Image: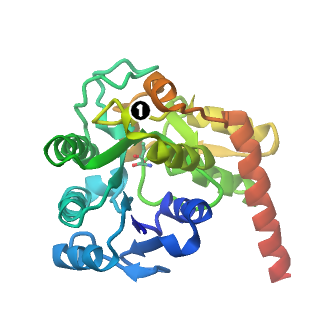
Protein backbone atom coordinates (compact mmCIF):
# COMPACT_ATOMS: atom_id res chain seq x y z
CA UNK A 1 0.00 0.00 0.00
CA UNK A 2 1.22 3.50 -0.85
CA UNK A 3 0.13 6.40 1.38
CA UNK A 4 -0.05 9.92 -0.05
CA UNK A 5 -0.33 12.99 2.18
CA UNK A 6 -1.51 16.32 0.74
CA UNK A 7 -3.41 14.48 -2.03
CA UNK A 8 -5.55 17.53 -2.83
CA UNK A 9 -2.63 19.84 -3.54
CA UNK A 10 -1.39 20.90 -6.98
CA UNK A 11 0.93 17.87 -7.31
CA UNK A 12 -1.17 15.41 -5.30
CA UNK A 13 -4.17 15.74 -7.62
CA UNK A 14 -2.03 14.48 -10.50
CA UNK A 15 0.32 12.15 -8.67
CA UNK A 16 -2.45 10.04 -7.07
CA UNK A 17 -4.07 9.00 -10.40
CA UNK A 18 -0.59 8.31 -11.83
CA UNK A 19 0.26 6.10 -8.83
CA UNK A 20 -3.08 4.27 -9.20
CA UNK A 21 -2.38 3.67 -12.88
CA UNK A 22 1.01 2.13 -12.04
CA UNK A 23 0.16 0.24 -8.84
CA UNK A 24 -3.61 -0.32 -8.93
CA UNK A 25 -6.43 1.71 -7.36
CA UNK A 26 -6.66 -0.26 -4.15
CA UNK A 27 -2.92 0.13 -3.53
CA UNK A 28 -3.01 3.92 -3.09
CA UNK A 29 -4.50 5.62 -0.01
CA UNK A 30 -4.98 9.35 -0.63
CA UNK A 31 -5.10 11.56 2.47
CA UNK A 32 -5.40 15.26 3.14
CA UNK A 33 -6.66 17.70 5.75
CA UNK A 34 -9.94 18.18 3.85
CA UNK A 35 -11.70 17.62 0.53
CA UNK A 36 -12.06 14.37 -1.39
CA UNK A 37 -9.86 11.84 0.47
CA UNK A 38 -9.69 8.13 1.20
CA UNK A 39 -8.77 9.05 4.79
CA UNK A 40 -8.66 12.46 6.47
CA UNK A 41 -5.20 13.16 7.93
CA UNK A 42 -3.58 16.15 9.63
CA UNK A 43 0.16 15.36 9.44
CA UNK A 44 0.81 17.61 12.44
CA UNK A 45 -1.36 15.25 14.57
CA UNK A 46 1.35 12.79 15.61
CA UNK A 47 -0.96 10.26 17.25
CA UNK A 48 -3.39 10.22 14.32
CA UNK A 49 -0.54 9.76 11.84
CA UNK A 50 1.00 6.91 13.83
CA UNK A 51 -2.40 5.21 14.22
CA UNK A 52 -3.02 5.42 10.46
CA UNK A 53 0.44 4.03 9.64
CA UNK A 54 -0.11 1.19 12.12
CA UNK A 55 -3.50 0.40 10.56
CA UNK A 56 -2.46 0.63 6.89
CA UNK A 57 1.17 -0.58 7.10
CA UNK A 58 2.17 1.27 3.88
CA UNK A 59 5.36 0.21 2.10
CA UNK A 60 5.80 3.71 0.64
CA UNK A 61 4.79 7.26 1.64
CA UNK A 62 4.66 10.25 -0.74
CA UNK A 63 4.65 13.18 1.67
CA UNK A 64 3.21 16.11 -0.28
CA UNK A 65 1.45 17.99 2.53
CA UNK A 66 3.05 21.44 2.78
CA UNK A 67 2.46 25.19 3.03
CA UNK A 68 4.05 26.86 -0.02
CA UNK A 69 6.49 29.79 -0.16
CA UNK A 70 4.26 32.88 -0.42
CA UNK A 71 1.78 31.64 2.19
CA UNK A 72 4.63 30.54 4.44
CA UNK A 73 6.06 34.08 4.54
CA UNK A 74 2.72 35.34 5.85
CA UNK A 75 2.20 32.49 8.33
CA UNK A 76 5.62 31.15 9.40
CA UNK A 77 4.31 29.32 12.48
CA UNK A 78 1.84 27.24 10.46
CA UNK A 79 4.42 26.73 7.70
CA UNK A 80 6.93 25.37 10.20
CA UNK A 81 4.38 23.15 11.92
CA UNK A 82 3.29 21.52 8.65
CA UNK A 83 6.50 21.62 6.64
CA UNK A 84 8.89 20.46 9.34
CA UNK A 85 6.97 18.94 12.28
CA UNK A 86 4.55 17.19 9.92
CA UNK A 87 7.44 15.77 7.92
CA UNK A 88 9.31 14.77 11.10
CA UNK A 89 6.19 12.85 12.20
CA UNK A 90 6.19 11.04 8.83
CA UNK A 91 9.84 10.03 9.20
CA UNK A 92 9.44 8.87 12.79
CA UNK A 93 6.28 6.97 11.88
CA UNK A 94 7.97 5.42 8.83
CA UNK A 95 10.77 4.04 10.99
CA UNK A 96 8.36 2.83 13.69
CA UNK A 97 6.07 1.06 11.20
CA UNK A 98 8.69 -0.35 8.82
CA UNK A 99 7.92 1.80 5.77
CA UNK A 100 10.44 0.99 3.00
CA UNK A 101 10.56 4.22 0.99
CA UNK A 102 9.54 7.85 1.53
CA UNK A 103 9.31 10.63 -1.09
CA UNK A 104 10.02 14.16 0.13
CA UNK A 105 9.43 17.04 -2.32
CA UNK A 106 12.07 19.70 -1.86
CA UNK A 107 12.34 22.84 -3.94
CA UNK A 108 14.62 25.36 -5.64
CA UNK A 109 13.57 27.47 -2.63
CA UNK A 110 16.45 25.84 -0.69
CA UNK A 111 18.82 28.06 -2.68
CA UNK A 112 19.47 31.70 -1.83
CA UNK A 113 20.85 34.58 -3.94
CA UNK A 114 24.49 33.43 -3.43
CA UNK A 115 24.48 30.61 -6.02
CA UNK A 116 25.28 30.46 -9.76
CA UNK A 117 21.91 31.63 -11.13
CA UNK A 118 21.62 30.24 -14.68
CA UNK A 119 22.42 26.57 -14.03
CA UNK A 120 22.48 26.05 -10.27
CA UNK A 121 24.26 22.76 -9.48
CA UNK A 122 23.03 20.21 -6.91
CA UNK A 123 25.98 21.02 -4.64
CA UNK A 124 25.47 24.80 -4.59
CA UNK A 125 25.16 26.11 -1.01
CA UNK A 126 21.63 26.03 0.40
CA UNK A 127 21.05 29.31 2.28
CA UNK A 128 17.31 29.87 1.77
CA UNK A 129 15.59 33.24 2.13
CA UNK A 130 12.08 31.99 2.98
CA UNK A 131 10.58 30.03 5.87
CA UNK A 132 9.41 27.50 3.27
CA UNK A 133 12.95 27.16 1.88
CA UNK A 134 14.46 26.89 5.37
CA UNK A 135 12.07 24.03 6.20
CA UNK A 136 12.80 22.30 2.88
CA UNK A 137 16.57 22.59 3.42
CA UNK A 138 16.19 21.18 6.95
CA UNK A 139 13.99 18.44 5.48
CA UNK A 140 16.72 17.42 3.03
CA UNK A 141 19.14 17.09 5.92
CA UNK A 142 16.57 15.07 7.87
CA UNK A 143 16.26 12.72 4.89
CA UNK A 144 20.03 12.15 4.92
CA UNK A 145 19.99 11.61 8.72
CA UNK A 146 17.19 9.00 8.59
CA UNK A 147 18.93 7.23 5.72
CA UNK A 148 22.20 7.17 7.65
CA UNK A 149 20.82 6.35 11.12
CA UNK A 150 17.89 4.08 10.28
CA UNK A 151 18.53 2.95 6.70
CA UNK A 152 15.23 4.55 5.70
CA UNK A 153 15.18 5.05 1.92
CA UNK A 154 14.04 8.71 1.84
CA UNK A 155 14.21 10.15 -1.66
CA UNK A 156 14.25 13.90 -2.33
CA UNK A 157 13.70 15.96 -5.50
CA UNK A 158 14.21 19.71 -5.72
CA UNK A 159 11.23 20.78 -7.81
CA UNK A 160 11.18 23.97 -9.89
CA UNK A 161 7.90 25.76 -10.52
CA UNK A 162 5.42 23.17 -11.77
CA UNK A 163 2.87 24.01 -14.44
CA UNK A 164 -0.08 21.86 -15.41
CA UNK A 165 -3.62 22.09 -16.74
CA UNK A 166 -4.75 19.26 -14.45
CA UNK A 167 -4.79 21.10 -11.12
CA UNK A 168 -4.67 24.52 -9.48
CA UNK A 169 -1.64 25.66 -7.45
CA UNK A 170 -2.06 27.22 -4.03
CA UNK A 171 0.08 29.76 -2.20
CA UNK A 172 3.25 29.44 -4.23
CA UNK A 173 5.48 32.03 -5.86
CA UNK A 174 5.23 30.17 -9.18
CA UNK A 175 1.42 29.94 -9.20
CA UNK A 176 1.39 32.81 -11.73
CA UNK A 177 2.74 30.45 -14.40
CA UNK A 178 -0.51 28.42 -14.24
CA UNK A 179 -2.86 31.37 -13.66
CA UNK A 180 -1.54 33.25 -16.73
CA UNK A 181 -2.92 30.52 -19.01
CA UNK A 182 -6.33 30.56 -17.31
CA UNK A 183 -6.51 34.33 -17.90
CA UNK A 184 -5.47 33.88 -21.54
CA UNK A 185 -8.22 31.37 -22.39
CA UNK A 186 -10.82 33.63 -20.71
CA UNK A 187 -9.62 36.66 -22.67
CA UNK A 188 -8.79 38.46 -19.42
CA UNK A 189 -5.82 40.77 -18.83
CA UNK A 190 -3.38 38.92 -16.56
CA UNK A 191 -2.11 40.92 -13.55
CA UNK A 192 1.35 39.39 -13.04
CA UNK A 193 2.89 39.41 -9.51
CA UNK A 194 6.42 38.93 -10.89
CA UNK A 195 8.38 41.40 -13.00
CA UNK A 196 8.61 40.71 -16.75
CA UNK A 197 12.20 39.44 -16.80
CA UNK A 198 12.11 37.40 -13.56
CA UNK A 199 13.27 34.00 -14.89
CA UNK A 200 12.75 30.83 -12.85
CA UNK A 201 13.25 27.14 -13.49
CA UNK A 202 9.93 25.62 -14.58
CA UNK A 203 8.68 22.10 -15.33
CA UNK A 204 5.53 20.60 -16.84
CA UNK A 205 3.37 18.72 -14.32
CA UNK A 206 3.34 15.65 -16.60
CA UNK A 207 7.17 15.63 -16.59
CA UNK A 208 7.36 16.21 -12.82
CA UNK A 209 5.01 13.32 -12.03
CA UNK A 210 6.62 10.89 -14.50
CA UNK A 211 10.08 11.85 -13.20
CA UNK A 212 8.99 11.37 -9.57
CA UNK A 213 7.56 7.89 -10.21
CA UNK A 214 10.63 6.85 -12.22
CA UNK A 215 12.91 8.16 -9.43
CA UNK A 216 10.98 6.29 -6.74
CA UNK A 217 11.10 3.08 -8.81
CA UNK A 218 14.86 3.30 -9.49
CA UNK A 219 17.02 0.63 -7.79
CA UNK A 220 18.38 1.96 -4.50
CA UNK A 221 22.00 1.69 -5.65
CA UNK A 222 21.34 4.25 -8.41
CA UNK A 223 20.42 6.91 -5.83
CA UNK A 224 23.83 8.28 -5.04
CA UNK A 225 22.79 11.63 -3.56
CA UNK A 226 21.37 11.21 -0.02
CA UNK A 227 20.17 14.83 0.07
CA UNK A 228 18.41 14.62 -3.27
CA UNK A 229 18.49 15.88 -6.85
CA UNK A 230 17.62 19.01 -8.82
CA UNK A 231 14.83 18.26 -11.29
CA UNK A 232 15.11 20.69 -14.19
CA UNK A 233 12.82 21.46 -17.13
CA UNK A 234 13.21 24.87 -18.78
CA UNK A 235 13.90 28.43 -17.63
CA UNK A 236 11.25 31.08 -18.29
CA UNK A 237 10.25 34.57 -17.17
CA UNK A 238 6.73 36.08 -17.32
CA UNK A 239 7.64 37.86 -20.59
CA UNK A 240 8.50 34.45 -22.11
CA UNK A 241 5.11 33.02 -21.16
CA UNK A 242 3.39 36.14 -22.52
CA UNK A 243 5.21 35.79 -25.85
CA UNK A 244 4.38 32.07 -26.11
CA UNK A 245 0.71 32.82 -25.35
CA UNK A 246 0.58 35.73 -27.84
CA UNK A 247 1.78 33.42 -30.60
CA UNK A 248 -1.63 31.69 -30.19
CA UNK A 249 -3.72 34.49 -28.65
CA UNK A 250 -2.49 37.74 -30.31
CA UNK A 251 -4.79 39.93 -28.21
CA UNK A 252 -3.49 38.60 -24.85
CA UNK A 253 -2.78 41.44 -22.38
CA UNK A 254 -0.51 41.34 -19.30
CA UNK A 255 -0.13 43.95 -16.56
CA UNK A 256 3.07 43.61 -14.48
CA UNK A 257 2.45 44.47 -10.82
CA UNK A 258 5.37 42.89 -8.89
CA UNK A 259 4.62 42.13 -5.24
CA UNK A 260 6.25 40.14 -2.39
CA UNK A 261 6.39 37.10 -4.66
CA UNK A 262 8.73 38.93 -7.03
CA UNK A 263 11.17 39.45 -4.14
CA UNK A 264 10.99 35.74 -3.25
CA UNK A 265 11.59 34.80 -6.90
CA UNK A 266 14.56 37.18 -7.04
CA UNK A 267 16.32 35.06 -4.39
CA UNK A 268 15.88 31.83 -6.35
CA UNK A 269 17.89 30.44 -9.31
CA UNK A 270 16.89 31.25 -12.87
CA UNK A 271 17.78 27.75 -14.12
CA UNK A 272 18.93 24.37 -12.73
CA UNK A 273 21.77 22.02 -13.56
CA UNK A 274 20.14 18.58 -13.27
CA UNK A 275 22.90 16.47 -14.83
CA UNK A 276 23.17 14.24 -11.74
CA UNK A 277 19.50 13.18 -12.08
CA UNK A 278 20.01 12.48 -15.79
CA UNK A 279 23.16 10.45 -15.18
CA UNK A 280 22.14 8.57 -12.00
CA UNK A 281 18.57 7.51 -12.79
CA UNK A 282 17.82 8.59 -16.39
CA UNK A 283 15.83 11.80 -15.83
CA UNK A 284 14.71 13.50 -19.09
CA UNK A 285 12.08 16.26 -19.34
CA UNK A 286 9.90 16.23 -22.47
CA UNK A 287 8.12 19.61 -22.35
CA UNK A 288 9.70 22.83 -23.59
CA UNK A 289 8.10 26.21 -22.86
CA UNK A 290 6.54 26.20 -26.34
CA UNK A 291 5.14 22.66 -26.13
CA UNK A 292 3.78 23.23 -22.62
CA UNK A 293 2.17 26.55 -23.61
CA UNK A 294 0.36 24.89 -26.53
CA UNK A 295 -0.83 22.05 -24.28
CA UNK A 296 -1.98 24.44 -21.53
CA UNK A 297 -3.99 26.57 -24.00
CA UNK A 298 -5.48 23.49 -25.67
CA UNK A 299 -6.59 21.78 -22.44
CA UNK A 300 -7.73 24.90 -20.61
CA UNK A 301 -9.34 26.32 -23.74
CA UNK A 302 -11.37 23.13 -24.22
CA UNK A 303 -12.37 23.12 -20.52
CA UNK A 304 -13.42 26.78 -20.69
CA UNK A 305 -15.45 26.33 -23.90
CA UNK A 306 -17.22 23.33 -22.34
CA UNK A 307 -18.04 25.38 -19.23
CA UNK A 308 -19.39 28.23 -21.40
CA UNK A 309 -21.46 25.82 -23.48
CA UNK A 310 -22.92 24.27 -20.31
CA UNK A 311 -24.00 27.74 -19.14
CA UNK A 312 -25.63 28.60 -22.48
C1 LIG B 1 6.27 27.61 -4.60
N1 LIG B 1 5.49 26.03 -6.28
O1 LIG B 1 6.08 28.48 -5.42
C2 LIG B 1 6.33 26.16 -5.09
C3 LIG B 1 7.74 25.76 -5.43
C4 LIG B 1 9.80 26.40 -6.68
C5 LIG B 1 8.44 26.79 -6.30
O2 LIG B 1 8.47 25.48 -4.31
O3 LIG B 1 6.40 27.86 -3.44
- Residue 249: image location, x then y, percent: 81, 45
Residue 210 in view: yes
Q: Viewer-proximal residue, 165 or 1?
A: 1
Residue 274 to residue 253: above or below: above
- Residue 131: image location, x then y, percent: 23, 48
- Residue 197: image location, x then y, percent: 53, 29
At 29% from the left edge and 61% from the top edge, which residue is drawn? 99
Residue 27 to residue 70: above or below: below
Name the image colouring: rainbow
At 72% from the left edge and 35% from the top edge, which residue is drawn? 290
Q: Viewer-proximal residue, 204 or 150?
A: 150
Residue at mark 1: C-beta within 8 A of ligand 1: no
Q: Is residue 189 left or right of residue 235?
A: right
Q: Viewer-proximal residue, 106 or 181?
A: 106
Q: Quadrant of the N terminus?
A: bottom left
Q: Viewer-proximal residue, 12 or 27?
A: 27
Q: Quadrant of the C terminus?
A: bottom right
- Residue 205: image location, x then y, percent: 58, 49
Q: Quadrant of residue 129?
A: top left
Mark 1 secondary-structure assignment: helix
At 49% from the left edge and 23% from the top edge, which residue is drawn? 279
Q: Is residue 162 left or right of residue 312?
A: left
* Residue wearing tag 1: 222
Amino acid sequence: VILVTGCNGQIGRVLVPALRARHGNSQVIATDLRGAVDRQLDVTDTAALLALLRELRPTQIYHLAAVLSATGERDPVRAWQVNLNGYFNVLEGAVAEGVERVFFPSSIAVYGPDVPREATPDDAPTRPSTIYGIAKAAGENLAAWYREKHGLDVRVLRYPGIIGWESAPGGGTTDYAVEIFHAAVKGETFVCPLSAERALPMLAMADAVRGTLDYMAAPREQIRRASGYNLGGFSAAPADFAAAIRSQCPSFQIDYQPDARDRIAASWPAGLDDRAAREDWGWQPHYTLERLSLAMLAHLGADYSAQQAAKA
